[in-house]
């Protein structure tokens, strides 16, 4: 069974497909949050972190589309793949650890406020990175989106 091929001429098909990779991932975050919490949280449409990784989906969709357009053996596809892998590694590494550090700092700030230390700091964002599973799910989603919109 062949997948349907959808071609839309907006001037830059790579950006078009990459956008849809990102959008579908962000929409899935809203739907998964709603399914798990029974609350509709539209802030997940633009939020960082969570399942699936929209960074991975965005770049995998772009890389795959480049591969479809100019060939998987091309230097351009190789460069796109390298950038994609760097971003995916960063999302599951540095950004994930930064989110863990933010959670610890938020607890320290809450303890200081509770103990009357007079601290009045804004909470740090904790959900900014991804687990390896979230990154892989985003990558597979991006590949799927690129294949369908090819």
Image (tube, rainbow, N blue to C red):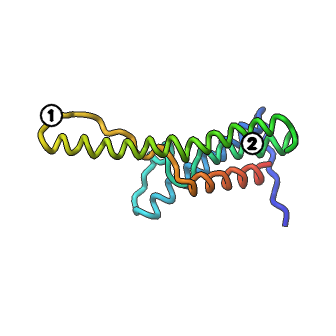
Whole-percent x and y of residue 133? 57, 57
Whole-percent x and y of residue 11? 78, 32
Whether residue 120 sits left or right of residue 80 in the image: it is left
Mark 2 burial class by Cα count in 10 Å: few <14, some 14-19, many 20+: many
Whole-percent x and y of residue 109? 25, 40
Q: Name the element at disc 2.
A: helix
In this view, the residue in front, 103 or 148, is 103
Residue visible at 37% across and 42% down in the picture: 102
Q: How many marks?
A: 2
In this view, the residue in front, 39 or 140, is 140
Can you identify the residue that label 2 sits on?
A: 63
Measure the alpha-carbon separation of dots 2 and 1: 50 Å
Whole-percent x and y of residue 148? 76, 54
User: Disc 2, disc 1: CB below 8 Å?
Assistant: no
Q: Earlier in the sequence, mark 2 or mark 1?
A: 2
Can you identify the residue that label 1 sits on?
A: 118
Front of the two marks 2 and 1: 1
Residue visible at 67% across and 43% down in the picture: 85
Residue visible at 75% across and 49% down in the picture: 146
Question: Taking 72 as reference, is 140 above or below it?
Answer: below
Whether residue 31 sits left or right of residue 37 in the image: it is right
């Amino acid at each position: 069974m062949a997948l349907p091929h959808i071609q839309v001429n907006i001037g830059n098909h790579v950006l078009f497909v990459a956008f849809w990779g990102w959008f579908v991932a962000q929409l899935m975050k809203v739907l998964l949050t709603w399914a798990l919490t029974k609350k509709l949280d539209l802030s997940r449409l633009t939020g960082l972190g969570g399942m699936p990784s929209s960074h991975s989906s965005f770049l995998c969709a772009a890389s795959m589309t480049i591969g479809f357009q100019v060939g998987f053996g091309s230097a351009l596809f190789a460069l796109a793949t390298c950038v994609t892998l760097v971003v995916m590694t960063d999302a599951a590494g540095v950004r994930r650890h930064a989110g863990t550090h933010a959670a610890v700092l938020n607890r320290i700030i809450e303890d200081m406020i509770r103990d009357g230390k007079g601290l009045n700091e804004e909470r740090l964002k904790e959900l900014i990175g991804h687990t390896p599973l979230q990154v892989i799910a985003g990558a597979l989603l991006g590949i799927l989106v690129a294949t369908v919109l090819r």
